[in-house]
Image: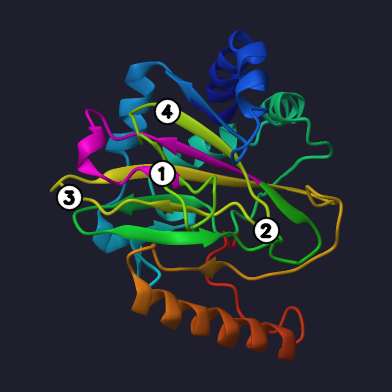
Amino acid sequence: MNRTELADYITKRLDLLFSEKIEEFCQYGRINSFIVDDVLPESLALQIYNAFPKKEEMIRKRSLRENKYVAAQMNLYNPILEEAIYAFQDLRVVSRLSEITGIKDLIADKYLYAGGISLMDKDCFLNPHIDNSHDKDRSNYRVLNLLYYVTPNWKLEYGGNLELWDNGLKGKPRTIWSKFNRLVVMITTRSSFHSVSPIRHEGQRCCLSNYYFSPTSIDGEEYFHITAFRGRPEQKLRDILLRGDIALRSAIRKLVPKGILPLSHVYKK
């Protein structure tokens, strides 16, 4: 099964739910997002899950900000993982996403900057954050985040679910269950805080990630910011430390010329 054949299924599923997803994405008063279930035939989704590498073969990111395993160098792994990721970059899929979201000039990221695959198991988490504002070359704005979950029989109570902080970090997040064979599409802006709830289960939650870019930001204004992590409302001390982390890393980015700092999370073909 190659990326074109997989994209056939994705496109047909988006077409079937087209009007419904436009309405869902445009709901007022929350971070723009929509969900698509049963994206691929179950057998294919299972095949993708079973192709995931062991966590020891991935890069562990562990700090006050996050605890997870990631990989973007897709030629090191089972080919179906790369085919599945790039199926979401098929021109037909990108076109449907542009029509559903109303975002023009969408650009898929062949370098998988901060994308690729991720694995989270017991005690893994992702603290509330806004994504880096640009692509790897700082040429285009990050505008959409696509998350495709492939762990069978993953229950809501296991944790590892996407949380969208619609009312900011002083409110309560909207939880989106990382259900098997589910695609979540969310907008990324200067205020689209999101997180992944801590996992309380011995299993592993696996996800394929894609980011999409545009020459123009969502609000039409020019800006640049790094990925900025914050503490949860109950994590007062952690929030202070993470605010300092934001300030330090932002200062480094401003002082160091573009292109000097190495990028560790890209697909180097």
Q: Nearer the viewer, mark 1 or mark 4?
A: 1
Q: Which of the image's four quarters has the C terminus?
A: bottom right
Label 3: element kind: loop
Asked if the residues shown at circle 3 and circle 1 are in contact, with their CB atoms under 8 angstroms apart, the answer is no
Is 78 magenta? The answer is no
- Please name the residue that numbered disc 4 is placed on: 182
Quadrant in which residue 100 is drawn? top right
Q: Earlier in the sequence, mark 4 or mark 3?
A: 4
Q: Is residue 222 above or below residue 80?
A: below
Is 155 magenta? The answer is yes
Asked if the residues shown at circle 2 and circle 1 are in contact, with their CB atoms under 8 angstroms apart, the answer is no
Label 1: element kind: strand
Q: Is residue 12 above or below residue 87?
A: above
The stretch in magenta equals 144-163
Front-most of residues 229 and 208: 229
- Please name the residue that numbered disc 1 is placed on: 162
- Please name the residue that numbered disc 2 is placed on: 190
- Give the class, few, some or many, for how many residues have Cα within 10 Å of label 2's Cα (few <14, many ≥20): some
Q: Residue at x 33, y 28 (%)?
A: 180
Mark-to-mark CA distance, 1 and 4: 12 Å
Looking at the rendered structure, the kind of residue marked 1 is Leu
